[in-house]
Image (spheres, grey):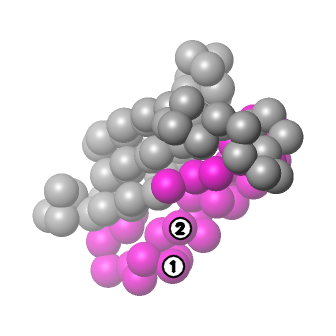
Amino acid sequence: MMVLFDEIRTRLASLETQEVSIHDDSAAHAGHAGNRGGGHIDLLIVSECFSGKRSVDRHRMVYALLADLIPQHIHALSLKALAPDEF
């Protein structure tokens, strides 16, 4: 999982993140229907580039960077994308 976390951090670097917290929550979802091996990831990102943007636009920015990791490596992504003043 650490290799996946490193890959996520590398991809998110273009957002000039101030904070990135990644948590593997896969164990809580073991054996659930539809999961073909990807992990359940909780992701918190803080970046100035999110300032003034709607939540949906923030999520689109992140998903664009991680899209090819879904669903093989990331089955489910719980995402919190915040501007620094919201953190």
> Which disc is residue 3 wearing?
none
User: In the depicted view, which residue is nearer to us: 14 or 64?
Assistant: 64
Q: In this view, does 11 lie to the left or right of 75?
A: left
Location of the N terminus (image quadrant): top right
SS at mark 1?
helix
Identify which residue is drawn at 64% across, 26% down: 4
Q: Does the magenta stretch include residue 26?
A: no
Mark 2 burial class by Cα count in 10 Å: few <14, some 14-19, many 20+: some
Front-lying residue, 2 or 15: 2
Give how far apart the Cα atoms at labels 1 and 2 are: 5 Å
Report the magenta residues as a range.
49-78
Residue, disc 1: 56
Residue 51 part of the magenta-drawn span: yes
Badges 1 and 2: C-beta atoms under 8 Å apart? yes
Label of residue 59 in the image: 2
Give the quadrant of residue 39: top right
Residue at 80% in and 34% down: 37
Task: Give the mark count.
Answer: 2
Q: Give the vertical position of 32 relative to 84 (above or below).
A: above
Q: Is residue 11 visible to us here?
A: no
> Which quadrant: the C terminus?
bottom left
